[in-house]
Image: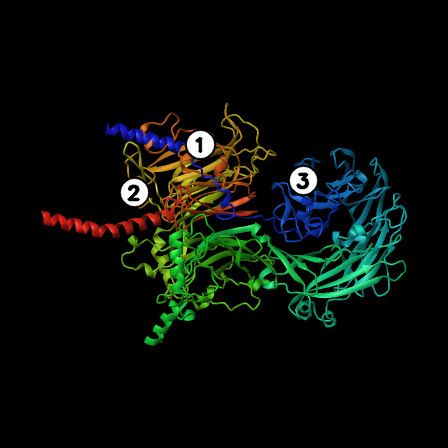
């Protein structure tokens, strides 16, 4: 009877587990347990067709109130193409994203062209794809493939040879230039190609760059190669039929694309304000009138009084006014002239003065920058409030006042020869320490009563809007560099403890009466604390896992330093992220706000120009950076960023930035026992690094102190974490270099084995390495960087197929292991294969071999390789072959061997695309495979793999269980959840290309799920029957209604609660949430009636108080009668 009851209980438990738990997020928890940052990317400022610009919308009486509310009071949007291949529209009022369109990676944006309430774009090689959007909402009206991307011309810059021009007020006439020699007229409503013109042999040598439509002709302007320079080439086409009206090579000599500009007026008639080409030729401005017959002659640009520069002109600047007939010609001394399209001519109508000091012109060229008080100007322009009025401005940094300055010039044309010109100068408190330098600027067309706004894009990826009122206020800032994070890590916050030196805490010179007085002062808030404790106890209003993290209050009422502290459950942590733009951020994990940010300095390369590219990031605890006799109390954790500094003179160095994780301060200056690593504070406020290697680093990883069991003679306090780096000659460098870190290296040196990717004549291979003494010997003086006495040497080489190269080496995800095995239903045990030296290797066919998505006979299809390898001796523990072919143009895969994999403990998961490359009856689609590795040949076969030497017999004696599932989507990243002690079941977090973050329970990916009905023993293991499809359950979608786009990596971090893990994803967007794979078993539910519990306990206590005397009397009475 007892056996049947146990089997019944097991069956009931299995039945309950077979039903998926309700893991969906409550609507009230959205924005509390998670946050989402919608980003667009750093704007592309290299060309006017991609740079940020204000675009006024045509909002009439038919525009609904919702659209007006979304757009804001300015009635305009900020349009920009970004480095993340996104076309975005921002609201000028607050910088919010009005809409965005994300392009595929291979469909690179060439440019956008705004007209009225429409935005047209060309993307792909040569402008292969045309799209038309609604500028107010981002609705895609039209998408048309103009030519195959593989036949498009690859140009640099990417927008060269592409252009879009609107012929009327609406979208009925759209003229599109692609590939530099093909012009089409499209119907913007239907997408119909009404006519097409392609350049013949006569104009084949010309690259056409611009279109200018008029009622009588469509002018196609470009450059033709001549002997010493370029000449302008113009073709006139009939706007109705596309027939050629005329072809003319303009007598000219143009050096580059910035030496000419096309000016067209709003009213283009046959002989009044006809479009003109203006160009620079030997410092002289010339123009050419565009007529259908192309029979005009080049003329020299005329100037009104005091508008011509004294220095030769060097370039044209398009400030967004060329379609209003205005452009800027800039001279070598920084002066500029505003050009205006007049009556059948181009003339200079207003001027800016020179920005260089007169003395600087007489100095040598290398001394000009020191003598110059201002930087080069960035030019902006917009239409004014009056008819024909324009506002021209320039923005530059003044070294005299250490501020950014804006000079504005308002030009109003009049009927006479003299025009009204007004000027104004404003100073902007631009923070160059936090945002670098200004890379681009744009000026808004302000409505009446609203001051104009200046949009700035900085070198660090920030986008700012400044209101050009007399006090120049900063309205908002978007840190778009966060859309280009390279590496990021969680940092646990310390508890909130008061600093004794600042809070009246105990000091060495404090006497008895001083301590008494301090204690009295500390107790002044005790009544308030007691009342709050009683209120929380009676009402049950404690912090919960679904409440917003609040930092724990210190026990003292004294003020703490302005550093973040953790909350009661450890949900509040710091996320330190380094970006491509050379800026590092610390984000608050509770809300995503920026706690601090620093700009990475260039060091010596600042004189020649350079870029700092983050490579890896490591977290050091407070105990790792203190001296042997120092107290860890009050110390902060830190991060070490390994970066490559690529100078413009082609030199490459490896630099280490050591940063205090709580404040962003330079932590390299406080490393004890290493006076060499104490750089001076940079007066510019930049974070300067420590030059470690003169050249690139081939590998860097973190050394953790050896386990206590392996060190019998040395205390654990004598060790500390350190970053080990290898240069091109495989010499070892250690950071920080202290006696404790060197002791760690000496203790771990015999056990260090790691793989490196090596280029050989036969292809890319993986070679195992170990550390040994340097041939030159170890230096006797350990304080003088004695760790350089080590060098890595090869120990093994993995044999790969001859036509296969290494694609990626994926290290395992390390963390605490709570159990060494899995108990089966038959009371046997499968012991986990926990070899700490394993890594995953992905291989791909050699790039020279063609890759096709077509089906091939079995055995002839190209394949990828996935290997699980022991790093100590190169033994392959697990391997499989995966199809390499992908289907192009169907959104299923963008490259060969698009495999995502992760390894944690004994669990391997990988995801790939199967295009039905071999065999019959196979279904194409995405596959997810779950693999578990166990010791020995089966159950109860224990080999102690976690402690066994890799050279021992049976080290690769492994039992493998694997199961494949059909996954509905492609994924871009995957990672397991992590908890503090590793007791909670690990779930798999994936980011799909459908812009969602999903959680897949571990039990659904159990490779031991039977293909039949589960038995009673299997029910006791909580196994469920195998189903080939992992359905997309909305309850498992962590991002719920958020669009989390183009995620590149997922990192997880444990909270103080064993049940909860923090999940952070980054790519184009950022998203953070909390997950509890096994439920919140370590905290009471929010529905738990704490008040009823208090009342019940209180009632029982009162009952005991009243009944205790009665029971005592009764017992006494009974004793008398006995």
Dot in front, 2 or 3: 3
Dot in front, 2 or 1: 1
Q: Which mark is residue 964?
A: 1
- Can see residue 676? yes
Image coloring type:
rainbow
Q: Does the residue at mark 2 contact the one at mark 1 (Cβ under 8 Å)? A: no
Residue 375 image offset from top left, x and y in percent: 68, 64
- Which image quadrant for residue 810? top left
Residue 707 image offset from top left, x and y in percent: 32, 53
- Can see residue 760? no
Residue marked by disc 3: 139
Residue marked by disc 2: 944
Residue 390 image offset from top left, x and y in percent: 79, 57
Q: Is residue 800 left or right of residue 685?
A: left
| SS state under label 2 | loop
Give the residue furthest to the left: 1122
Neighbour class for label 2 at 10 Å: few (<14), some, many (≥20)? some
The answer for how far apart the CA atoms under marks 2 and 3 are is: 60 Å
Q: In terms of depth relative to the viewer, which is nearer, 748 or 998? A: 998
- Which image quadrant for residue 524? bottom left
| SS state under label 1 | strand
């Amino acid at each position: 009877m007892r056996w049947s009851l146990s089997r019944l209980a097991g069956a009931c438990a299995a039945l309950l587990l077979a039903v998926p738990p309700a893991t969906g997020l409550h609507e009230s928890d959205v924005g509390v347990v998670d946050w989402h940052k919608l980003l667009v990317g750093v704007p592309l400022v290299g060309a006017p067709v991609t740079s940020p610009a204000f675009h006024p919308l045509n909002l009439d009486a038919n525009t609904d109130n919702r659209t007006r509310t979304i757009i804001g009071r300015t009635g305009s949007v900020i349009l920009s193409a970004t480095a993340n291949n996104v076309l975005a529209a921002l609201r000028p009022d607050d910088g919010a994203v009005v809409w965005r369109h994300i392009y595929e990676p291979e469909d690179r944006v060439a440019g956008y062209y705004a007209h009225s309430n429409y935005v047209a774009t060309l993307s792909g090689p040569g402008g292969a794809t045309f799209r038309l959007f609604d500028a107010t909402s981002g609705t895609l009206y039209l998408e048309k493939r103009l030519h195959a991307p593989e036949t498009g011309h690859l140009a640099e810059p990417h927008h060269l040879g592409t252009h879009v021009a609107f012929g009327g007020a609406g979208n009925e006439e759209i003229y599109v230039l692609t590939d530099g020699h093909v012009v089409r007229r499209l119907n913007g409503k239907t997408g119909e190609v009404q006519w097409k013109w392609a350049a013949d042999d006569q104009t084949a040598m010309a690259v056409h760059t611009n279109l200018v439509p008029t009622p009588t002709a469509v002018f196609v302007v470009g450059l033709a190669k001549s002997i010493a320079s370029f000449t302008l080439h113009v073709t006139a086409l009939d706007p109705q039929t596309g027939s050629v009206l005329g072809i003319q090579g303009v007598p000219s000599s143009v050096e580059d694309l910035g030496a000419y500009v096309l000016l067209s007026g709003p009213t283009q008639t046959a002989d009044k304000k006809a479009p003109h080409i203006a160009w620079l030729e030997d410092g002289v401005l010339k123009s050419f009138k565009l007529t259908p017959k192309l029979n005009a002659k080049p003329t020299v640009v005329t100037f009104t009084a005091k508008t011509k520069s004294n220095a030769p002109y060097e370039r044209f600047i398009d400030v967004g006014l060329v379609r209003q007939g205005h452009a800027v010609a800039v001279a070598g001394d920084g002066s500029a002239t505003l050009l205006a399209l007049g009556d059948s001519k181009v003339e200079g109508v207003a001027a800016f003065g020179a920005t260089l000091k007169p003395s600087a012109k007489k100095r040598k060229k290398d001394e000009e920058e020191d003598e110059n008080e201002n930087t080069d100007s960035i030019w902006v322009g917009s239409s004014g409030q009056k008819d024909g009025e324009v506002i021209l401005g320039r923005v530059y940094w003044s070294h005299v006042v250490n501020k950014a300055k804006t000079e504005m010039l308002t030009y109003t044309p009049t009927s006479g020869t003299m025009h009204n010109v007004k000027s104004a100068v404003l100073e902007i408190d631009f923070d160059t320490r936090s945002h670098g330098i200004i890379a681009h600027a744009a000026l808004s067309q302000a409505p009446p009563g609203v001051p104009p706004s200046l949009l700035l894009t900085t070198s660090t990826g920030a986008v700012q809007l400044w209101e050009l009122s007399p006090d120049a206020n900063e309205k908002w800032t978007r840190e778009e560099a966060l859309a280009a994070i390279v590496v990021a890590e969680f940092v646990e916050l310390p508890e909130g403890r008061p600093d004794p030196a600042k809070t009246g805490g105990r000091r060495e010179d404090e006497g008895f009466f001083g301590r008494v007085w301090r204690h009295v002062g500390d107790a002044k808030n005790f009544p308030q604390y007691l009342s709050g404790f009683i209120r929380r106890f009676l009402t049950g209003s404690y912090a919960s896992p679904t409440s917003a993290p609040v930092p724990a209050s210190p026990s003292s009422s004294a003020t703490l330093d302005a550093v973040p502290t953790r909350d009661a459950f450890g949900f509040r942590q710091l996320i330190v992220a380094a970006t491509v733009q050379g800026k590092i951020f610390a984000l608050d994990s509770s809300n995503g706000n920026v706690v601090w940010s620093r700009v990475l300095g260039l060091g010596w390369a600042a004189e020649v120009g350079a870029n700092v590219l983050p490579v890896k990031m490591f977290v050091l605890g407070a105990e790792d950076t203190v001296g042997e006799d120092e107290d860890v109390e009050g110390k902060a954790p830190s991060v070490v960023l390994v970066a490559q500094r690529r100078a413009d003179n082609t030199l490459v160095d490896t630099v280490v930035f050591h940063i205090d994780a709580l404040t962003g301060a330079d932590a390299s200056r406080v490393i004890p026992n290493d006076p060499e690593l104490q750089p001076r504070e940079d007066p510019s406020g930049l974070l300067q690094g420590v030059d470690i290697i003169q050249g690139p680093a081939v590998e860097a990883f973190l050394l953790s102190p050896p386990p206590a069991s392996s060190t019998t003679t040395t205390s654990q306090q004598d060790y500390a974490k350190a970053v080990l780096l290898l240069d091109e000659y495989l010499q070892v460098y250690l950071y920080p270099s202290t006696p404790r870190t060197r002791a760690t290296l000496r203790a771990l040196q015999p056990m260090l084995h790691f793989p490196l990717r090596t280029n050989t004549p036969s292809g890319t291979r993986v070679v195992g390495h170990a550390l040994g003494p340097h041939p030159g010997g170890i230096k006797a003086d350990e304080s003088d960087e004695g760790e350089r006495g080590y060098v890595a040497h090869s120990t093994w080489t993995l044999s790969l197929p001859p036509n296969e190269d290494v694609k990626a080496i994926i290290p395992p995800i390390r963390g605490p292991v709570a159990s060494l095995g899995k108990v089966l239903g038959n009371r046997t045990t499968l012991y986990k294969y926990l070899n700490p030296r394993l890594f995953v290797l992905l291989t791909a066919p050699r790039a020279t071999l063609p890759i096709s998505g077509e089906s091939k006979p079995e055995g002839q299809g190209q394949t990828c390789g996935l290997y699980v390898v022991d790093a100590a001796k190169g033994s392959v523990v697990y391997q499989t072959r995966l199809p390499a072919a992908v289907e192009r143009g169907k959104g299923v895969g963008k490259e060969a061997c698009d495999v995502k994999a992760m390894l944690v403990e004994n669990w391997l998961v990988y995801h790939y695309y199967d295009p039905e490359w071999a065999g019959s009856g196979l279904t194409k689609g995405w596959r997810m495979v779950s693999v578990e590795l166990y010791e020995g040949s089966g159950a109860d076969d224990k080999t102690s793999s976690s402690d066994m030497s890799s050279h021992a017999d049976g080290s690769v004696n492994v039992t493998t269980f694997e199961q494949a599932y059909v996954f509905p989507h492609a994924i871009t990243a995957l990672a397991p959840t992590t908890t503090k002690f590793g007791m909670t079941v690990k779930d798999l977090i994936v980011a799909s290309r459908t812009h969602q973050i999903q959680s897949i329970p571990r039990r659904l990916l159990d490779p031991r799920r039977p293909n039949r009905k589960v038995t009673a023993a299997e029910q006791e293991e909580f196994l469920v029957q195998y189903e080939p499809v992992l359905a997309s359950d909305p309850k498992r979608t962590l991002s719920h209604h958020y669009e989390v786009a183009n995620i590149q990596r997922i990192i997880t971090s444990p909270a103080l609660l064993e049940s909860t893990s923090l999940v952070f994803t980054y790519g184009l967007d950022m998203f953070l949430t909390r997950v509890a794979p096994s439920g919140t078993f370590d905290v009471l539910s929010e529905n738990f009636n704490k008040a009823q519990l208090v009342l019940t306990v209180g009632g029982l206590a009162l009952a005991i108080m009243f009944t205790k005397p009665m029971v005592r009397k009764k017992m006494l009475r009974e004793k008398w009668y006995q």
